[in-house]
Amino acid sequence: MKSRKLIAGVDEVGRGSLVGSVFSAAVIFQPSIDIENIVDSKKLSSKKRVKLSNNIIVNSLCVSIGVATKDEIDDINIHHATLLSMKRAVDNLRIIPDIIYFDGLYVPDSNIESHAIVKGDSKIREISAASIIAKVARDNEMTHLNKMFKIYDLVKNKGYGTPHHLQAISFFGKTIYHRESFLKL
């Protein structure tokens, strides 16, 4: 009898944002489940992402989130903070996978067989699912911060450096949630 290997997919969101944490998610699917329309989170509307994220959570063996805070980003740089958030997502899994596929060029330190897959969020369904979960979690952070700082329009720009966001920073300054290492003003 041949057994199936448990595969975890990991992806991050928020690397280029000027505000907040970088979020990563790890997903291990139930082997027999096939969820339709799982693609890179950037190709989905917010409403579809939320609906799919709920479907992914219900139909997965395990889903976890890892976060690196804006202070960690400022202290160790965005590259290392991203790897830290990915490592935390893997460490937070309650089931240990046999193989982990990470979106991108780099993998964090792990005792589990790991592979970096460039554009993995469009090639491997577990990475696509992780992309969706991480995006929904980070969007929730931006929604929360927007309630306190409406002038930056974080619900719309998700913390990225849009002209409106940069103009608001120029007029009103930074919040404590803005990444100092990204905004040397």
Image: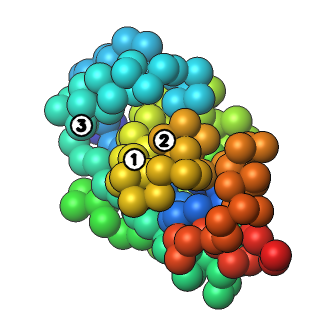
Quickly name the residue at label 3: 57
Q: Amino acid at mark 3?
A: Ile
Residue 92 showing in the rendered view: yes
Mark 1–mark 2 contact, CB under 8 Å? Answer: yes
The numbered mark, 2 or 3, whose residue comes first in the sequence reads: 3
Label 3 to label 1, Cα distance in Å?
21 Å
**Mark 3 and mark 2 in contact (Cβ < 8 Å)?**
no
Q: Nearer the viewer, residue 29 or 88?
A: 88
Residue 181 marker: none
Which residue position is annotated with label 2?
155
The percent position of residue 84, horizontal first and vertical second, equals 54, 73
Most distant residue in the front direction = 171
Q: Earlier in the sequence, mark 3 or mark 1?
A: 3
Q: Earlier in the sequence, mark 1 or mark 2?
A: 1
List x then y, in percent, for residue 63: 29, 48
**Residue at which label 1 appears:** 143
Residue 130, how many percent across, how many down? 44, 42
